[in-house]
Image: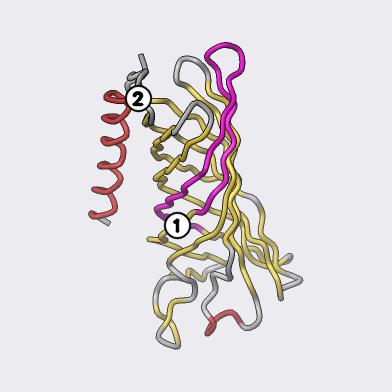
Amino acid sequence: MKKILMISIGFLLTAGSVNAQTALDKKAETVMEGGIKADVTFLNFQKTGAPRAVSTLTPGCTPGGFMNIWFNDWVGIRPELNLNFKQTVLGWSDNGGQFRSFGVEIPIYVVGRIKVFGTHHLFLGIGPYTEFICHAKWSIGDRKVDLLEIHSGDEPMIQDTQSGFGAILGYEFGAGISIDISYKICCYNILQPNTSQGVSLYPQTISLGLAYKLGKK
């Protein structure tokens, strides 16, 4: 956990540094800029093999940081580092439980943008993401299950990494403030083979975010 926090702090400091050093350089062919962001993230699961299972979109929070690397005025890449605090109602139609998790997520979007209203921009990105799950628990009734603890078969109940694809749509105002909406879905079943019993769970999230570029003049 200490290593993850150091990486996160380093990412945010680097984002602010490169933004201050290069984003204002009008002659640079590649412009880098970075900042901080905060999202409200809604989680639920796509399911197969469990017709009575329910999973309700439930809000959590996602603070983080981002870097925009623009190769020209229209195309670039946008890596992010996010700390996900997520939750959802997960169970059956007559007996729901609470799923909560904490993880470190790294999406990398290929982004295009167009200028609108002077200094404002509209941007759209798609790309892969990976999330490293540090904590995951499921509570139903009086039962609390640590999903990353080894229970049987020498494996935890869920995988501690999730990978898939995402998309982001945003609007950047001239003052360096931007708003965005993003969607991500895991591309494989996160349940381990020894616990799945024919059931598949695919996490998906919808996030509404507010971001600010550090060093913006």
Q: Which residues are magenta?
A: 100-128
Q: Secondary structure at mark 1?
A: strand
User: What residue is at 38 percent from the left and 61 percent from the top?
Assistant: 134
**Percent x, y for residue 128?**
52, 54
Q: Amino acid at mark 1?
A: Glu
Mark number, residue 131: 1
Please give left or right for residue 196 compared with residue 147 in the image: right
Residue type at the position of mark 2: Ala
User: In the rendering, which numbered label is found on residue 92?
Assistant: none
Q: Looking at the image, is 14 positioned above or below residue 52?
A: above
Q: Residue at x 45, y 40 (%)?
A: 78
Q: Nearer the viewer, residue 87 or 179?
A: 179
Q: How many marks?
A: 2
Neighbour tally class for label 2: few under 14, some 14-19, many 20 plus, Cα within 10 Å: few
Between the C-alphas of marks 2 and 1, the distance is 33 Å
- Dominant secondary structure of the residues highlighted in magenta in the image: strand
Which residue has dot 2 on it?
Answer: 28
Q: Residue at x 43, y 67 (%)?
A: 160
Relative image position of residue 43 (x, y in whole percent): 59, 52
